[in-house]
């Protein structure tokens, strides 16, 4: 049996409920094994968001995706057929487990980017948190594009993140989810190290 594919999702010290909502949506939970196999380990560092809010998103995702879910201390194990997805939850992690992660999904915070950009042989998905301080993460991402070889998956209408209730559920979340996984799949096939969407 091969080792699980490990995904690290980090939002830093603030909160990024739009990203956690989209990642934990039923559409994305169903999509995970299509892209990463039947054994997946997710380390979800959710920052300042309340755990109960994150847990509600997971419970909704479990209910609507058809997975069975078993909660343990700080984790949930999702099962459907031969698929097992283990999601470990942490408000903060220091250090973050970059070296054991195959895919790193991160906000565009300066501190986190200073840690992840020097990594080699890692697929990194950078998602600017546009809900913070005058859109500074988008500004950081724009500057980064000039300094680093970055793949961009075309123009994305950021309003899709806010479509529907609770930060991107519904049609907007599905659209983002499709784009999200298409870009991750391109990065896996093309050996691209960094994506900004």
Image (tube, grey):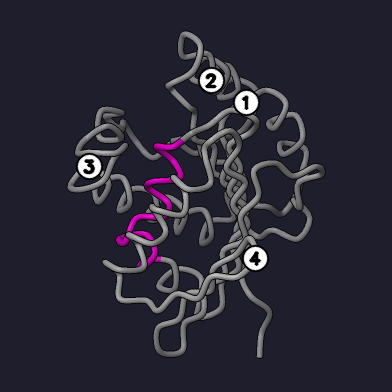
152 or 62, nearer to the observer: 62
Q: Residues within 10 Å of mark 2 (few under 14, many from 20)?
A: many
Residue 137: numbered disc: 2
Q: Is the C-beta separation of discs 1 and 4 under 8 Å?
A: no
Q: What stretch is highlighted in magenta?
A: 17-31
Counting from the top left corner in percent of width and height, residue 186 is at: 45, 55
Residue 101, placed above or below residue 15 = below
> For the residues carrying marks 1 and 4, which lies nearer the camera in this image?
4
Dot 4 alpha-carbon crowd within 10 angstroms: few under 14, some 14 to 19, many 20 or more: few
Q: Does the magenta segment cover residue 141?
A: no
Q: Distance from label 1 to label 4 (Cα)?
A: 29 Å
Q: In the image, residue 1 lies at what x, y percent?
A: 66, 91
Image quarter (top left, top right, bottom left or bottom right) of the C terminus? top left
Assign a secondary structure to mark 2: helix
Relative height, residue 125 to residue 114 (above, below): below
Q: Which of marks 1 and 2 is nearer the N terminus?
A: 1
Identify the residue shown where x is 53% and y is 13%.
136
| First in residue order: circle 1 vs circle 4 | 4
Q: Mark 3 and mark 4 in contact (Cβ < 8 Å)?
A: no
At horizontal 34% and vertical 35% (from top left) the residue drawn is 154
Q: Is residue 167 above or below residue 27?
A: above
Q: Do the residues labelled 1 and 2 touch (CB within 8 Å)?
A: yes
Residue beneath disc 3: 172
Q: Residues within 10 Å of mark 1 (few under 14, many from 20)?
A: many
The image quadrant that residue 81 belongs to is bottom left
Q: Mark 4 points at which residue?
A: 73
Residue 99, by quadrant, is bottom right
Q: Is mark 3 on a helix, strand or loop?
A: helix
Q: Residue at 50% of width from left, 39% of height from top?
A: 151
User: The residue tagged with tag 4: helix, strand or loop?
Assistant: loop
Pick the front one: 46 or 29: 46
Q: Which tag, 2 or 3, sits closer to the chain's start?
A: 2
């Amino acid at each position: 049996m091969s080792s699980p594919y490990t995904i690290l999702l980090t939002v830093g010290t603030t909160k990024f409920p739009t990203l956690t909502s989209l990642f934990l949506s039923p559409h994305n939970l169903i999509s995970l094994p299509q892209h990463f196999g039947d054994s997946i380990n997710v380390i979800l560092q959710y920052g300042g968001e309340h755990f109960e809010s994150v847990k509600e998103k997971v419970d909704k995702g479990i209910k609507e995706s058809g997975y069975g879910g078993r909660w343990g201390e700080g984790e949930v194990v999702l099962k459907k057929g031969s698929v097992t997805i283990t999601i470990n939850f942490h408000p903060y992690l220091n250090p973050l487990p970059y070296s054991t992660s195959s895919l790193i999904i991160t906000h565009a915070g300066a501190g986190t980017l200073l840690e992840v950009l020097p990594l080699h042989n890692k697929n990194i998905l950078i998602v600017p948190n546009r809900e913070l301080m005058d859109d500074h993460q988008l500004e950081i991402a724009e500057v980064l594009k000039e300094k680093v070889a970055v793949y961009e998956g075309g123009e994305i209408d950021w309003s899709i993140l806010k479509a529907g209730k609770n930060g991107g559920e519904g049609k907007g979340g599905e659209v983002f989810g499709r784009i999200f996984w298409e870009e991750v799949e391109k990065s896996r096939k093309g050996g691209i190290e960094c994506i900004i969407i």
